[in-house]
Image: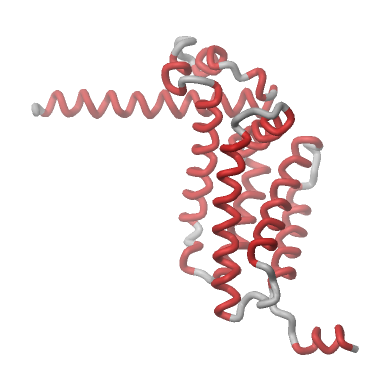
Amino acid sequence: MSEQLKIRRQTQVERRAESEQRLLAAAAELIAAEGFAAASLERVGAVAGYSRGLASQKFGSKDGLVTAVIAAVIDRNTQIMSARHVRSVSPLDDIIAYADVILLQIEADVFIRAYWVMMASAIANRLPTQAVFLAEHDKVKQRLSGLIVQGQASGEIDPAVDPDAAALSIGSTLLGIGIECLLDPALDIPRVRAAALATISRTLAPVTPNQQKEVHA
């Protein structure tokens, strides 16, 4: 293969990647600002600066667009988590770091706000994409539950905690804050974030001997 052909193919790949990112960004902006119904494939293509049919070619359908935006949110969160080197710390720190990343994203990232809007729309309208959100949330629950089990084995997390129930509770807390942020754009996210992280930490922390005495007193 000639060097010129390699460069041409590389350029084509780069253009496709750039167009997909611009389409996803346009979709997230539209959904977060105007709601799920506003983000037709034709309008997403136009807002991104492409022909109206490109979004259809890229995603196939609106359900395909939803799946792509969800994947983008997960990818962005994974990159942020990797940048924080959370794999090198303890299970409890991993859990707190995950919750912190989600809460920081609620405040700063249009993609995560678009995620909440799409999820709310899927639930309210009984859309098939509910299954996509449920599958992703189940992955998060399993991940958090596994970290709780690891923390219990190391003595860092209270052995009395039910891993699955606690993981679901943490995920539900983050979901609730996200939905509340949509309802109230003036919500004091830093204050809520601090309270949520402290609550998660207290819920999972082992009971000290002094606390046990107080309970039985």
Quadrant assignment, res 2: top left
Q: Examine the rendered structure and indicate whether residue 130 appears above or below residue 138.
A: above
Task: Name the quadrant of the C terminus.
Answer: bottom right
Q: Examine the rendered structure and indicate whether residue 210 appears above or below residue 184.
A: below
Q: Examine the rendered structure and indicate whether residue 185 appears above or below residue 40.
A: below
Horizontal arrangement in the rendering, residue 13 relative to residue 59 (left or right)? left
Report the front residue among 102 and 120.
120
Quadrant assignment, res 145: bottom right
Q: Position of residue 99 (x, y in %)?
A: 64, 56
Quadrant assignment, res 15: top left
The residue at 60%/68% (across/down) is 148
Task: Name the quadrant of the N terminus.
Answer: top left
Q: Position of residue 35 (x, y in %)?
A: 69, 24
Q: Position of residue 47 (x, y in %)?
A: 55, 16
The residue at 68%/68% (across/down) is 162
Q: How is the image coloured?
A: secondary structure
The residue at 54%/40% (across/down) is 73
